Image (cartoon, rainbow, N blue to C red):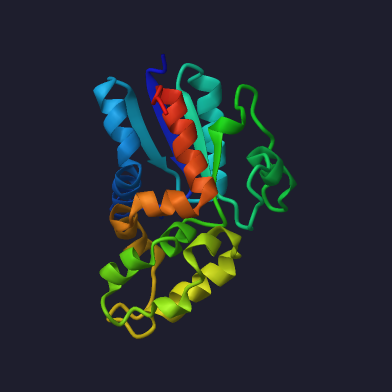
Amino acid sequence: MIKSIAIYIEGGGSTTQTLVPFRTGMSAFLKSVVDVVRTKGIKWRVIPCGGRQEAYDAFVDAIDKEPDVFNVLLVDSEDPVAFGVSPWDHLKKRKGDEWDKPAGADDARCQMMVACMEAWFLADPDGLKKHYGDKFDSTKLPAPNLAENRTKAQINDALKNATKKTKAKEYRKIRDGAKLLAKVDVIAVRKQCKWCERLFAELENAIGVKK
């Protein structure tokens, strides 16, 4: 049985003031997994790494030095990706990444936020409205089931236009991202985002959650 899980994640900024809330927010988003992990006495670590290259490098190092740990890499795909494509193939072919799959790291160890973390937020417009208030304009968002089909630029533009008249004025990743991770309806996100559901499914399979 797996005794330890570590998730190396792109994002969270570069200071303790930003990394800690992001870690807390991501663990809140993954609460259904965390709850099972705790009951089984499995060690759980969420490790925000700031940049995507830093996340990959830390993951590769962990795969080499901690072979007994279920290490997982979680990064933005940066582009829409058809569900079922090998994440390692996508990241190997993507210009700017061109990452090799480390020995011992199968597809289950590589997870992607498609095209970025903010797609998860688009999948729950009601959660966004609760966070930003009544002046949040949900009509500026794509349909929730299309969240993973949008480019990163389209996702950011949708959030920008939807938040324009709110008190916050705009979506800010560092200011708002961690809070939204803890607020959005995870069940809704999993239903609308296949790649997000894949993340949960692989983690649940690793810790022995019965379907």
Indicate left or right for 99 with 155 as reference.
right
Picture residue at 30% right of the left edge, 28% below the top: 36
Looking at the picture, how far across and down is residue 139, in whole percent? 44, 79
Task: Name the residue furthest front.
Answer: 211
Q: Position of residue 143 (x, y in %)?
A: 50, 68
Using the rendered image of the protein, determine whether residue 14 is visible from the camera's viewpoint: no
Residue at 58% across, 70% down:
153
Along the viewing direction, whichever of 173 and 194 lies nearer the viewer: 194
Q: Nearer the viewer, residue 123 or 151?
A: 123
Question: From this viewpoint, which residue is outermost toward the top?
Answer: 1
Residue sitting at x 61%, y 22%: 104
Task: Residue at 31% x, 27% y: name it.
Answer: 37
Q: Is residue 64 above or below residue 179?
A: above
Give the quarter of the figure containing the N terminus.
Answer: top left
In this picture, residue 34 sits left or right of residue 69: left
Position in image of residue 182 (x %, y %): 29, 53
Position of 170 relative to 148 (above/below): below
Which one is in front, 50 or 163? Answer: 163
Q: Horizontal placement of 172 versus 158: left or right?
A: left
Query: How many marks are shown on the rendered structure?
Result: 0
Question: Residue 89, position in %: x, y?
Answer: 71, 40
Residue 163, picture quadrant: bottom left
The reply to whether residue 200 is visible in this rendering is: yes
